[in-house]
Amino acid sequence: MRARLLPLLIVLMAGVLLALGVPLAVSVASAQQQKVVVDRIDDTARFASLAQFVTERPVGSRVRDKDERRETLQNELDYYNEVYGIRAGVFFRDTLPMAHAPDDWFLPGVGHPVRDAFEEALRSRGSHDPPQVWPWEEDGRIVVASPVIRDGDVIAVVVTDSPTGRMRAQTLHGWLLIGAGESAAMLLAVGAALRLTRWILRPVGVLDATTHDIATGRLASRVAAAGGPPELRRLARSFNEMADHVEDVLEQQRAFVADASHQLRNPLSALLLRIELLALELPEGNEEIASVRTEGKRLAQVLDDLLDLALAEHATADLRLTDIGALAAERVAAWRPLAEERGVLLEGHCPATTGWADPIALSSALDAVIDNALKFTPEGERVEVRVASADGTASVVVTDHGPGLTDEELARVGDRFWRSNRHQNVKGSGLGLSISRALLAAGGGTLAYERHEPHGLKVTVGVPRQAPGETPALRA
């Protein structure tokens, strides 16, 4: 969840910083250029004031022109170009130069920015808003033109063509400062996002872990007190209250099943005894009394299984590092005489494999699974028991070659008191696999069922190879 929430927060904060940083960077570039433009406007205004007093047009070369005012203007332009590297000139309406610097700089043709500024100034409008020059425009220049007005008429135009290297460098410097500030702000934002997500998700993680513990059978687990938003803290308290209520209900259910099973055994024993006494007064081989005996014994078996189930669900697993192969081989050897009696071949392939399990609970589960396989395997077929390990799990796979189960029956196998309609005549209470599942779940084990082709059932008993709380990396 953090992997989804954290990028979302970072993207949002990055968007906010960009929304603030981009206009600020544009403002810095505009401010730097406006500063240059204002300086050039002041310069062109000064040159225009000097050009107002030039009364004669040049008729020859600059050397023969003895107009002192024009010479003063020319000297100012030369000095201006020499000091600042800015091309400047005063041009009459017919584009002839009144004065210009450097000497080889003249008014360019139509379409050039300098000519466009000149044409605009002829209409008594100064160039106060030239196009923005960005730091990456190495050939960018700023052109400013101001009209020279005498007696209300525009007689000439002052034009300056300024390089922008220094301005672009200052703009870039400002952008770097903005970028550094944005980067620092982004780092602070990421740190704040990490703390925020940790603060928000800590109770969620604790709640998720506790929910997993309860789902795997550790009903005593509770959500520990943690920080986070008030809503999540309230949710944690509500969850603990719900878990307490559920545990109380389940405990009452277990207690009822155990007490009912225990209390019914004495009346049932008395009833069976009276049945035996009654059978002494009936003719030998009476079918009805034999049926009553069978149902009475079946009821006694159900009560015993109910008591075992209640104890299994309430029991705490005594986990130990166990040789699963040796334990499975032992159970195969114990069941082999019964298999031979029924004409079923019981095969065991049990290499040494270790896992964490309660040996008694695992033995009981294997007994139930093997017994179930032998019940439904016809004479002349075989039952295979294989031990293997993969993905951190040690497993015992019991495969039979009986009639198997349909998809609908596979979905229900292992439910309490459930038995297939096809197998109602087979001895059993329908609680054996439920008890096995409860015993295994207490130690983190599993019981899974699937088809075995072409016919039969495959039951997999799995136990973890790592101790509780141990990761595979730590174990290695």
Image (cartoon, rainbow, N blue to C red):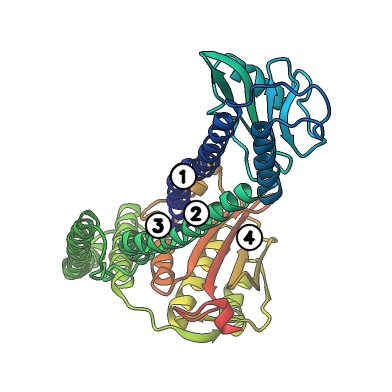
Judge by depth and name the residue closer to the eye, 335 or 175.
Answer: 175
Tell me if label 2 and label 1 are in contact, CB under 8 Å.
Answer: yes
Q: Could you say which quadrant of the image residue 325 lies in?
A: bottom right
Q: Would you call the spot at circle 3 few (<14 residues within 10 Å), some (14-19), or many (20 or more)? A: some
Tell me if label 4 and label 3 are in contact, CB under 8 Å.
Answer: no
Does residue 233 appear anywhere in the picture?
yes
Q: Which amino acid does label 3 sit on?
A: Gly
Depicted 189 relative to depicted 11: above or below = below
Q: Which of marks 2 and 3 is in front?
A: 2
Q: Distance between the Cα atoms at labels 4 and 3?
A: 18 Å
Q: Which residue in the structure is indicated by mark 1?
A: 24
* Residue at disc 3, secondary structure: loop
Name the spot of residue 379 as percent of width and height, x first: 65, 60
Q: Which residue in the structure is indicated by mark 4?
A: 400
Q: Which residue in the structure is indicated by mark 3?
A: 430
Q: Is residue 367 left or right of residue 243?
A: right
Q: Which residue in the structure is indicated by mark 2?
A: 178
Q: In which quadrant will I find the C terminus?
A: bottom right
Q: Distance between the Cα atoms at labels 2 and 4?
A: 75 Å
